[in-house]
């Protein structure tokens, strides 16, 4: 596997390189660039599986780099992780609108980024069988969805939980019309029961149809945590378990 680190700060490149070599897989080939233009030159001459890129860089910033990669038929399947100190809803939206697959905020916390990169590595590697949670859709209820929100969740960062809640609030501004309160309580209880027992990262997918909201997860530990509170779920919830995944269906029209 080949990973390209694009970052104008030499110290940050070194941190990421050491994390990949010593905590992910020492057989990974690592390329480095200090700006987007240099990164494109490397991609032109080499197959790249994962791009870790800063956004604010000289010569060519990460926005343009990501956009040009995703516009390329040859390179559009590169898994792109934006690692940046940019914050705020509009900036994060801009990162994803360019085509980034994932977003990690700076400053980098070693344990947290190790957990996230380990999962991304497994997702891209493909020769390790893991439950598939597609980034475009995952709905075992076989209902056409209108919107989806894909995230990599780590128990090491409570901000991930608030990010999901924030997304739900944007998706459903009239939160009195759905049972978000019960749903959020369920997430918090499950999160708290995992603290101290689980230090990895896993995928979550939130999707919405005309009438319902769906939360999907493929992590067995988190599924087992949610099962502890299944008896207290509102009767309107519908839970579907597959061999190694779980999806909760929540009505969005009234209580």
Image (cartoon, grey):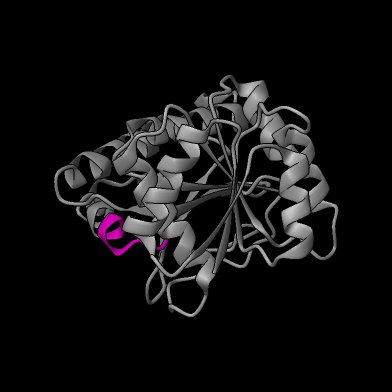
222 falls in the magenta region = yes
Query: Front-most of 20 and 143?
Result: 20
Residue 123 point in image, percent of width and height: 50, 65
The residue at the point 23 percent across, 49 percent down is 229
Residue that lies at the very extreme toward the left in this rendered image: 196
Q: Which residues are magenta?
A: 217-223
- Total labels drawn: 0
164 falls in the magenta region = no
Q: Is residue 4 above or below residue 158?
A: below
Query: Front-most of 175 and 92?
Result: 92
Residue 207 point in image, percent of width and height: 59, 49
Residue 25 point in image, percent of width and height: 39, 65
- Asked whether residue 191 appears in the rendered view, the answer is yes
The residue at the point 73 percent across, 40 percent down is 36
The residue at the point 31 percent across, 47 percent down is 233
Residue that lies at the very extreme toward the top in this rendered image: 88
Q: Is residue 176 above or below residue 7?
A: above
Q: Is residue 32 above or below residue 130?
A: above
Query: Front-most of 121 and 211?
Result: 121
Please give left or right for residue 68 compared with residue 110 in the image. Answer: right
The residue at the point 46 percent across, 52 percent down is 204
Q: Is residue 78 above or below residue 199?
A: below
Residue 243 point in image, percent of width and height: 38, 77
- Asked whether residue 116 appears in the rendered view, the answer is no
Q: Quadrant of the N terminus?
A: bottom right
Query: Front-most of 239 and 61?
Result: 61
Residue that lies at the very extreme toward the front in this rendered image: 10
Please give left or right for residue 57 compared with residue 44 in the image. Answer: left
């Amino acid at each position: 596997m080949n990973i390209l680190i694009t970052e104008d700060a030499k110290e940050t490149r070194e941190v990421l390189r050491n994390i990949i070599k010593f905590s992910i897989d020492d057989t990974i080939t690592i390329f480095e660039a200090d700006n987007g233009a240099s990164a494109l030159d490397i991609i032109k001459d080499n197959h790249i599986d994962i791009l870790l890129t800063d956004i604010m860089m000289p010569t060519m910033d990460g926005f343009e780099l990501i956009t040009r990669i995703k516009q390329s038929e040859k390179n559009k399947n590169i898994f792109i992780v934006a690692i940046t100190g940019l914050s705020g809803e509009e900036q994060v939206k801009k990162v994803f609108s360019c085509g980034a697959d994932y977003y990690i905020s700076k400053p980098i916390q070693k344990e947290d980024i190790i957990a996230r990169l380990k999962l991304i590595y497994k997702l891209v590697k493909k020769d390790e069988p893991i439950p598939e949670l597609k980034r475009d859709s995952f709905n075992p209820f076989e209902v056409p969805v209108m919107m989806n929100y894909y995230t990599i969740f780590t128990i090491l960062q409570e901000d991930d939980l608030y990010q999901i809640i924030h997304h739900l609030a944007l998706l459903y501004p009239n939160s009195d019309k759905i049972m978000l309160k019960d749903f959020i309580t369920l997430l918090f209880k499950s999160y708290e029961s995992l603290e101290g027992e689980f230090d990895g990262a896993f995928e979550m997918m939130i999707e919405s149809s005309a009438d319902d909201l769906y939360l999907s997860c493929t992590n067995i530990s988190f599924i087992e945590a949610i099962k502890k509170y299944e008896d207290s779920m509102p009767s309107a919830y519908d839970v579907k378990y597959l061999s190694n995944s779980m999806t909760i269906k929540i009505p969005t029209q009234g209580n």
